[in-house]
Image (cartoon, helix red, strand yellow):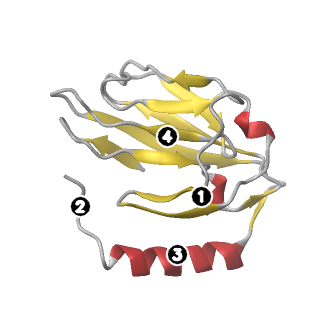
Amino acid sequence: MLIDKAPLTTYEFPWHQDNAYQFWNPPDAVALTLALDDSTAESGAIVCLSRSHRGSILPHQPSGVLGASRSLVTPPNADEYTPVTLTLKPGDVSLHHVNTIHRTGPNHTSRHRRNLGFAYHSSGSVCDNAAADQYKRDLEKFLQTQQAPK
């Protein structure tokens, strides 16, 4: 997928885990991010919580943010994890486990922060199709009520 955080945008993607909407079981899967532009704290880079992938999927809820469908019900404990900002140059790649808690901030720069996102899973990992179908129905209902972020 293409993610494009436009210049001078104030919206954020809240703390979440990708497997809360990908439904891999077992969660033998990673998300790969290929930077197309500079990705810095100022441009809303991904921030991962170190070691958070070791836990299970935490309760999520609709985020209310277009483009970031789910968020954690309870924010993560700041004392439990160390935040790591994924600062990337164009062409750099990062990987994170689908259970990793992560977020992005606003883009305070005058440049786009674009990246391509890819998902990879092991041959032994199976998608829970019933959960995925319900998620898609819920997401479609949400999208019908939303406007693009400013």
Amino acid under label 1?
A: Val
Choose mark 3 or mark 2, whichever is in front.
2
Residue for badge 1:
73
Amino acid under label 2?
A: Ala
User: Which x, y percent locates residue 141?
Assistant: 41, 81
Choose mark 3 or mark 1, whichever is in front.
1
Question: Alpha-carbon distance for marks 1 and 2?
Answer: 23 Å
The residue depicted at 42 percent of the width and 50 percent of the height is 1
Choose mark 4 or mark 1, whichever is in front.
1
Residue for badge 3:
136
The residue depicted at 80 percent of the width and 56 percent of the height is 125
> Dot 3, how many residues are within 10 Å of its Cα: few (below 14), some (14-19), or many (20+)?
few
Residue for badge 4:
103
Question: Alpha-carbon distance for marks 2 and 4?
Answer: 19 Å
User: Which x, y percent locates residue 4?
Assistant: 30, 43
Q: Is residue 44 left or right of residue 147?
A: right
Choose mark 1 or mark 2, whichever is in front.
1
- Rendered image quadrant of residue 76: top right
**Label at residue 91:** none
Amino acid under label 3?
A: Lys
Check disc 4 and report its element: helix, strand or loop: strand
State which tag comes first along the sequence, 3 or 1: 1
User: Which x, y percent locates residue 133?
Assistant: 60, 78
- Contact between marks 4 and 1 (CB within 8 A): the answer is no
Position of 62 relative to 46 (above/below)? below
State which tag comes first along the sequence, 4 or 3: 4
State which tag comes first along the sequence, 2 or 4: 4
Check disc 1 and report its element: helix, strand or loop: loop
Residue for badge 2:
148
Check disc 2 and report its element: helix, strand or loop: loop
Question: Alpha-carbon distance for marks 3 and 2?
Answer: 19 Å
